[in-house]
Image: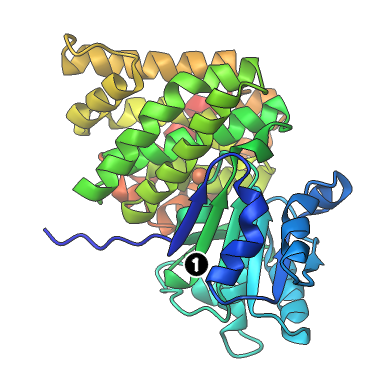
Amino acid sequence: MVVQLVAPRLMLMGGGSVAKLGEVLGQLGLAKPLVVTDPFMVSSGLVEQALAPLRAAGMAPVVFSETVPDPTDTVIEAGVAVLRAGDFDCLIGFGGGSPMDTAKAMTILAAAQPGTPIRAFKVPAAANAAALPVICVPTTAGTGSEATRFTVITDTERDEKMLIAGLGALPLAAVVDHELTFGLPKRITADTGIDSLTHALEAFVSKRANPVADDYARSAMRLIAPNLRRVWADPKDAAAREAMMRGATLAGLAFSNSSVALVHGMSRPVGAHFHVPHGMSNAMLLPAVTRFGLEAGRARYAEAARIMGVATEAEGDQAACAKLVEALVSWNRDLEVPTPAGFGIAAAAWEAVLPTMAAQALASGSPGNNPRVPTAEEIVALYREVYAG
Ligand SMILES: [Fe+2]
């Protein structure tokens, strides 16, 4: 078996590492960064954590702070206009998944002929070219985007969250500092944490799993599962925050070198149509989609349950799988994850888009990596099952 492994060229990990951002650029021979972030990072002052070390290294960083949650094609185009108008040699994605994914999509689009829509790069296209290198600094644990060859951008004309994949989306470097997550609200902590766990689990059960991605996934599940409730209960629990951050990055490496699967395939349309935060829509789907796949991936799901510490070595695969689903349900309850109905989505509105959401899920390719590959009808049934819990 030949495994292709992709990862950033340089990753700095640990508390306080963001202070070395200027040195990291220096090592890479970069000096003219455009910092891509969101308005909250600016208003809260958190972006100074990135700007100060850059200035201390003699650089004059420019800030593009118009990124939005679930970044859109229009924001990417605005960002590329800023990029083309200035004299930059790299992009720094600073924030949660949205600013990082925005920076990645900007560099992909900037490498294309002017006038090319970002839609031209959605899978199955290969987005391998990039205009400038991207350095990612995540402030959540997290999408793992700092370590992946993916970016997800919303097509505003078609209400579709597009998966864009290729070497162009792979950051050159990442600075992963868990101290940046100490101030995260509980809701974001929970949603992003479950997103990370979903990345690791989906990479592990994927049809595209391989021994290298498996090792990342195992490490990530071991770090994330016991710490989800801890960071929820005490946002300042430094050891738990550190474990979650390392777990999120390792989970990113896992799915970047394997894949995500049915949860993510079904989650993107929920985000696109109803603006449910990405990690939360994953969490809404995770128990039911896991139960759906068990019969086809029993040994893998059982091992995942043991790694997460929710089943013992002594328990057989059948029992371990049941414990896994129980644990996923109880984490959702403890972390106060709503159902789509509880989130405020009207039953008629949900029902009306189910065929579209199922078609978009299948078109993304992610369901095809699931241990049990669903039909469109089965996807619709799963959406119905999770609607009111
Ligand atoms: Fe995700």
Let me know if residue 138 appears in the view: yes
Residue shown at 78%/85% (left/top)?
A: 85
**Residue 155, x across and y down, in percent:** 63, 64
Say left or right for 372 vs 118: left
Vertical comparison of 166 with 319: above or below: below
Say left or right for 220 vs 371: right
Disc 1 element? loop
Query: Quarter of the image containing the C terminus?
Result: top right
Query: Quarter of the image containing the N terminus?
Result: bottom left
In the depicted view, which residue is nearer to us: 79 or 34? 34
Q: Estimate how packed mark 1 is, as few (under 14), some (14 to 19) or many (20 or more) residues with alpha carbons within 10 Å.
A: many
**Residue 158, x across and y down, in percent:** 63, 63
What residue is shown with label 1?
172
**Residue sitting farthest toward the right:** 43
**Residue 177, x across and y down, in percent:** 59, 43
Q: Quadrant of residue 126?
A: bottom left
In the depicted view, which residue is nearer to us: 256 or 114? 256
Residue shown at 42%/69% (left/top)?
A: 166
Let me know if residue 102 appears in the view: no
Q: How many marks?
A: 1
Vertical comparison of 127 with 265: above or below: below
In the depicted view, which residue is nearer to us: 224 or 187? 224
**Residue 295, x across and y down, in percent:** 21, 28
Say left or right for 150 vs 352: left
Vertical comparison of 327 with 340: above or below: above
Identify the coloring.
Answer: rainbow
* Residue type at tag 1: Leu
Residue shown at 40%/13% (left/top)?
A: 326
Q: Quadrant of residue 293?
A: top left
